[in-house]
Image (cartoon, helix red, strand yellow):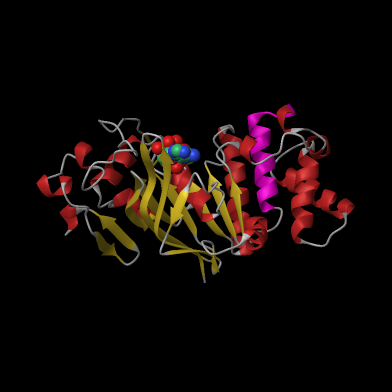
Amino acid sequence: MRLVEITDLTVSFPQADGVVQAVRGASFHVDEGESVGIVGESGSGKSVTCMAALRLLRQPPAKIAAKVMRLDGIDMLAADRKTLSGVRGRVAAMVFQDPMTAFDPVYTIGAQIVETIRAHREVSKADARREAEGLLAKVEIRTPAAVLDSYPHQLSGGMMQRAMIAMALSCQPRILIADEPTTALDVTVQAQILQLIKGLQDELGMGLVMVTHDLGVIAETVDRVVVMYGGRVMEEAPVAAIFDEAKHPYTRALMASMPGQVGGRRRLTEIPGSSPNPADPPMGCPFHPRCSEADARCGHEIPPVVVTGEASRAACWRLT
Ligand SMILES: Nc1ncnc2c1ncn2[C@@H]1O[C@H](COP(=O)(O)OP(=O)(O)OP(=O)(O)O)[C@@H](O)[C@H]1O
Ligand SMILES: [Mg+2]
């Protein structure tokens, strides 16, 4: 069963002095029980892609177009308001990069989780509250009752992140989209939360989209990796192939620059040059100005997507 199906997604934000092309023709999918990582430098379009898939971007200003954009078979482009509110939470839930986005500052955490649970299932307030307490305990919050009665601004970033994960999991979604879900947490808690997400994923057959900068998170939690740059998917491959035999020069540069413990090595370098300006992207391959392997063609024509393995593809002229 295909839980996420996105083909040729473009997202742009018209501005007074031009158009920000945040996503420029991205495609990927997630099957039932599968965990897919989205990686790429800051500004590559990862968050915008996730928000667009859930139709969480205000339109206007955002302009969203795609050949296909389905979540659990539901056409998210054609969905009306009622369908969308049914989808969010129950079909797909999101853990936001900024936890403040997830919560309304004027209600307690408890009121918001209880409401989310009761929006999709017929349970009493008391039962929903008990469930919420259980979920907070599951994400390693030691004083769940006190946190339920707190307002968002009373919690630390780490607590908020955990409460948000609990809220996202409260409706047992078919798809969990997690955007840097553990960045505000210390390493041990991070590992616990990732294990919790993985465990629930196996238990519920949930599809997982994990946006992360962390090689360790990728190595431990995802089956397949989608590499984004300049609003495009540069490469997609099973996680082992991304680590051991990345085909795209950008993937190799990114892997060499990302923090994380892989095979006992810790590497921290930077890819020389800077990311493309989304309001004025370069012609051809967006990576060509920084690519040591680029030739004239790379600067003029957008590279085709080349199948590089059973579940792998890359967009690079070098592979044609
Ligand atoms: N509402 C908006 N209006 C205008 N431009 C936007 C808007 N939201 C995002 N962008 C731009 O779209 C591009 C992609 O942003 P996005 O947040 O998806 O990046 P990202 O890959 O998630 O980066 P990070 O790793 O820093 O979270 C960026 O250039 C960003 O400035
Ligand atoms: Mg982001």
264 or 288, which lies in front? Answer: 288
Question: x, y percentage for residue 167?
Answer: 70, 47
State which quadrant residue 307 falls in. bottom left
* Residue 82 shows in this picture: yes
Asked if the stretch drawn in magenta spans residue 168, the answer is yes
Q: Quadrant of residue 260?
A: top left
Q: Inspect the magenta stretch and tell me whether residue 175 lies in it.
A: no
Q: Nearer the viewer, residue 311 or 48?
A: 48
Residue plotted at (79% across, 56% down): 118
In the rendered structure, the answer to whether residue 122 lies left or right of residue 276 reads right
Where in the figure is residue 175, as x and y percent of width and height?
A: 58, 59
Question: Where does the magenta region start and end?
Answer: 154-169
Seen in the image, is 87 located left or right of residue 21? Answer: right
Residue drawn at x 76%, y 34% as measured from the top left: 106
Quadrant where the image shows the C terminus: bottom left
Instruction: Give whichever of 13, 236 is nearer the camera.
Output: 13
Residue 137 percent across, percent down from the top left? 75, 44
In this view, the residue farthest toward the front is 16
